[in-house]
């Protein structure tokens, strides 16, 4: 089961990965011995995926369109007849 989960990590949405981190941390602390063992085995791969995504975001910050000046916005606004 753990290897199947690890194989699916790159395709997970960010929200799903965040939920997985939370659940794995909870199971390491308060799960049954079997759950703790499984969560501990998966945590390095989960943390590596989170770190890779954070590094990718840091390397490629979102690009914003330049803000139009007020003068340009006023010129572009339609005038009422």
Image (cartoon, rainbow, N blue to C red):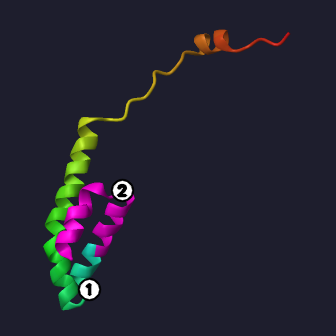
Nearer to us in this view, 24 or 12: 12
Spot occupied by residue 34 in the image (x, y as percentages of width and height): 19, 88
Q: Earlier in the sequence, mark 2 or mark 1?
A: 2
Q: Which mark is drawn over residue 30? A: 1
Q: Residue at x 86, y 9 (%)?
A: 81
Spot occupied by residue 32 in the image (x, y as percentages of width and height): 23, 90
Asked whether, in this view, residue 70 is left or right of residue 56, the answer is right
Q: Residue at x 31, y 62 (%)?
A: 17
Instruction: Establish if 13 lies above or below 44.
Output: above
Asked whether, in this view, residue 29 is left or right of residue 16, the answer is left
Instruction: Establish if 19 lies above or below 74.
Output: below
Residue 8, magenta (yes or no) = yes
Tell me whether the residue at label 2 lies in contact with that at label 1, contact meaning CB atoms closer than 8 angstroms: no
What secondary structure is marked by label 1?
helix
Q: What's drawn in magenta, residue-wise? A: 1-23
Residue 48, by quadrant, is bottom left
Q: Main secondary structure of the magenta part?
A: helix
Provide the residue designation for mark 2.
13
- The quadrant of the image that shows the N terminus is bottom left
Nearer to us in this view, 26 or 46: 46
């Amino acid at each position: 089961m753990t290897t199947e989960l690890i194989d699916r990590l790159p395709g997970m949405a960010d929200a799903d990965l965040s939920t997985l981190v939370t659940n794995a941390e909870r199971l390491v602390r308060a799960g049954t011995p079997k759950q703790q063992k499984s969560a501990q085995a998966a945590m390095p791969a989960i943390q590596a995926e989170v770190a890779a995504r954070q590094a990718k975001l840091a390397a490629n910050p979102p690009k914003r369109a330049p803000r139009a000046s007020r003068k340009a916005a006023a010129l572009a606004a339609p005038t009422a007849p």
